[in-house]
Image: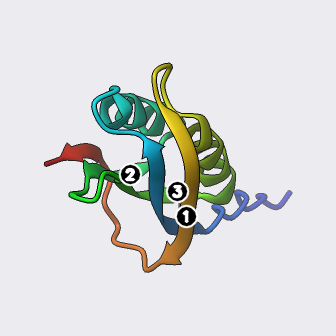
Amino acid sequence: MSRREPPAALPLMRWRLIAQGVVQGVGYREACRRTAVGLGLAGWVRNRTDGTVEMEAEGQLSQLNDFRLWCDKGPLHARVNRVETSQIPLTGEDWFEVRS
């Protein structure tokens, strides 16, 4: 009887997302961190001086898609007008943090 090989791990991707709208001063970064950790993503989130919130997230495509759906909505008091998304190179991080 031969042993079955375990299924290959799904490939990882890394996305940069920039949320525009009312996304600062409404708890977006901390809610983003909690959501990303809950989805098993690695990366970071930070406020930018232009009033947007920038995120980098690394994980499997399904996790990233779920994260993007959350980013489009954000926390309760946020009003997200747009989220720009681009694929960037992997970094291999294994945590998600709020950066200043």
**Badge 3 amino acid:** Gly
Disc 2 to disc 1: CB gap under 8 Å: no
Report the residue that reaches farthest toward the right: 1
Crowd around label 2: few <14 · some 14–19 · many ≥20 (10 Å): many
Task: Look at 48% across and 41% down and name the residue there.
Answer: 40
- Where does label 2 land, which residue? 42
Circle 1: residue type: Glu
- Up-down relation of residue 42 to residue 16 (above or below): above
In the rendered view, does 56 fall on the left or right side of 74? left
Judge by depth and name the residue closer to the eye, 5 or 40: 40
Q: Residues within 10 Å of mark 1 (few under 14, many from 20)?
A: few
Q: Residue at (82%, 61%) from the top-left corner? A: 2
Q: Is residue 10 left or right of residue 30?
A: right
| Quadrant of the image containing the N terminus | bottom right
Residue type (three-letter) at the residue carrying disc 2? Ala
Name the colouring of the figure.
rainbow
Q: Position of residue 16 (x, y in %)?
A: 45, 66
**Secondary structure under the numbered disc 1 in the rendered image:** strand
Q: Check if mark 3's residue and mark 2's residue have beta carbons within 8 Å.
A: yes
Q: Position of residue 59 (x, y in %)?
A: 52, 56
Q: Which residue is mark 1?
A: 84
Going by the image, does 80 lie left or right of 99?
A: right
Q: How many angstroms separate mark 2 from mark 1 (CA)?
A: 19 Å
* Mark 2 or 1, closer to the camera: 1
The nearer-to-camera label among 1 and 3 is 1
The single residue placed furthest to the left in the displayed view is: 100
Residue drawn at 59 percent across, 53 percent down: 64
Q: Earlier in the sequence, mark 2 or mark 1?
A: 2
Query: Label 3: few (<14), some or many (≥20) within 10 Å?
Result: many
* Residue with the mark numbered 3: 59
- Separation (CA) of disc 3 from disc 2: 7 Å
